[in-house]
Image (tube, rainbow, N blue to C red):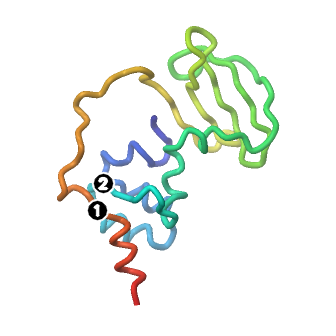
Amino acid sequence: MRTDHGGLRERTHGGRSFWKANAGDAGATMAEIMGSRWGKLSATDTAFRNLFEITDPSELLKPTGGLSKGTTKQVPGDTAVGVVDSGADGGTLWVATTGEPYPLFLEGPEGKGHITFNSFGASFPDIALPGASEVVDLDKLLRRTTAP
C-alpha cells in the first residue's frame, strides 16, 4: 500500500514528511527523534492510534455514509468500478472488475488524497524485524515526556 503524502511508504525516506503531516506542532520534533527508525507501540496505545489507523483495513475502508455504484474507469493496474461513499469523509473505492474483486485505489473526497493497493498474495521474504537499535519504543517515549 502506498499513500500520496507519507504514511507507510515514507519509512524509506526517514518518515519526516509523515510526522510533519500527522503530528501537528510536534511533527518536526517527532521527525528528529524518529529519524529513519521504526516506531513500536503496544496494541492498547491510544496516544498515537489515529496516526496508524490507515494500516487497519476495517477502519480505512469503513463507510461514513451511504454507498452507491459509480462509473467504471482505468486505475493503476486494471479496470475498476467505483464504490462511492456519500459521507462527509467518504470518497471512492475503485474495485477490480476482472479476476478477484480486490480494492485497487482509494480516492478521498473530491479527489483529495489517494491510496494505491497492489501486490495481493505476494510474499516478501526480504522483510525482517528491525534490530533493537532501529526501533523507538513510543510507549516509553510518551511515558517519559508526560511524567511529572
Q: Which mark is residue 38?
A: 2
Q: Where does the image place residue 87, in percent across and percent down from the top left?
A: 78, 44
**Quadrant of the snapshot with the C terminus:** bottom left
Check disc 1 and report the residue beneath it: 136
Q: In this view, does 133 lie to the left or right of 148?
A: left
The amino acid beneath tag 1 is Val
Question: Dot 1: few (<14), some (14–19), or many (≥20) neighbours within 10 Å?
Answer: some
- Extreme residue toward the front, this view: 44
Say which residue appears at 60% left-offset and 34% top-offset: 106
- Give me the residue at 17% from left, 59% from top: 133
Residue 114 left/right relative to 26: right
- In terms of depth relative to the viewer, which is nearer, 108 or 145? 145
Residue 135 location (% of width, % of height)? 25, 57
Element at badge 1? strand
Mark 2, Cα crowd under 10 Å, few <14 / some 14-19 / many 20+, is some
The quarter in which the N terminus is drawn is: top left
Residue extending farthest to the top is 98
The answer to which of 57 and 111 lies nearer the viewer is: 57
Above or below: residue 129 compared with residue 142: above
Residue 131 in the image: state x and y as whole percent.
Answer: 18, 51
Q: Who is closer to the viewer here, 18 or 142?
A: 142
Query: Is residue 141 depicted above or below 148 in this figure?
Result: above
Q: Which of marks 1 and 2 is nearer the N terminus?
A: 2
Q: Vertical placement of 127 versus 104: above or below? A: below
The Cα atoms of the two marked residues, 1 and 2, are separated by: 6 Å
SS class of the residue under badge 2?
Answer: strand
Drawn side of residue 48 relative to residue 97, left or right: left
Q: Marks 2 and 1: in contact by CB < 8 Å?
A: yes
> The residue under label 2 is which amino acid type?
Trp
Determine which quarter of the picture holds residue 12: top left
Residue 41 coordinates in the image, percent (x, y)? 39, 59
